[in-house]
Image (spheres, rainbow, N blue to C red):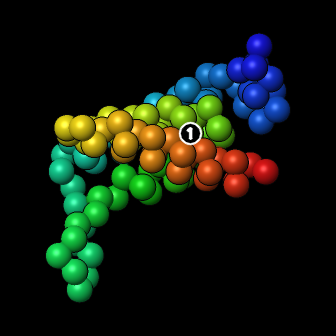
Amino acid sequence: MALQWILQFTGQSPRRVLIISIGFGAAALLIVFMDLSVPIPGTNYLTDPREIFTTIGSAISGPLGAILIGVLAGLAVPGAASLASIFAHVVGCLVVALSYRF
């Protein structure tokens, strides 16, 4: 019931949300599996470009898609940090989706 209400409220079809969120979430997941990283100039730290896909996908697909994208984006983190990564990505994706929509 709540799922249908959210989809009606955001004006999205379930098929569209699913296709967009799986596509963008899979792109974020592949970036981590392929170990793509970008060095941050002036530091010894690296970052990965998966946030590009999580941000754009969350903005397009809305809150439900953002949850799925966040889970997929955080899955590939190895070890005990995977739950923290999933939580952080889901929260971040939800913030983007809600900010963009409302």
* Structural crowding at the residue carrying mark 1, measured as other residues with C-alpha within 10 Å and reported as few (<14), some (14–19) or many (≥20): many
Is 92 left, or right, of 81 in this rendering? right
Q: Nearer the viewer, residue 101 or 91?
A: 91
Residue lying at 21% horizontally and 55% vertically, measured from the top left: 36
Q: Find the residue positioned furthest to the top.
A: 1
Q: Quadrant of the N terminus?
A: top right
Secondary element under disc 1, as helix, strand or loop, is helix
| Residue for point 44% across, 57% down | 52
User: Does residue 14 lie above or below 89 as drawn?
Assistant: above
Residue 42 appears in the figure: yes
- The x, y position of residue 21, in whole percent, is 51, 34
Return the residue nearer the eye: 95 or 36. 95
x and y percentages locating residue 40 in the rendered image: 27, 75
Q: Residue at (60%, 44%) from the top-left corner?
A: 94
The quadrant where residue 8 appears: top right
Residue 57 percent across, percent down from the top left: 53, 45
Whether residue 24 is visible here, answered yes or no, is no
Give the tally of numbered discs.
1
Check disc 1 and give the amino acid type.
Ala
Q: Nearer the viewer, residue 11 or 9?
A: 9
Q: Please give left or right for residue 4 compared with residue 58 in the image.
A: right
- Left or right of 54 on screen, residue 79: left
- Tell me if residue 84 comes above or below residue 55 in the rendering: above
For label 1, the residue is 66
| Corner quadrant of residue 81 | top left
Q: Residue at x 30, y 38 (%)?
A: 82
Q: Quadrant of residue 85?
A: top left
Instruction: Residue 101 in the image: state x and y as whole percent.
Output: 74, 49
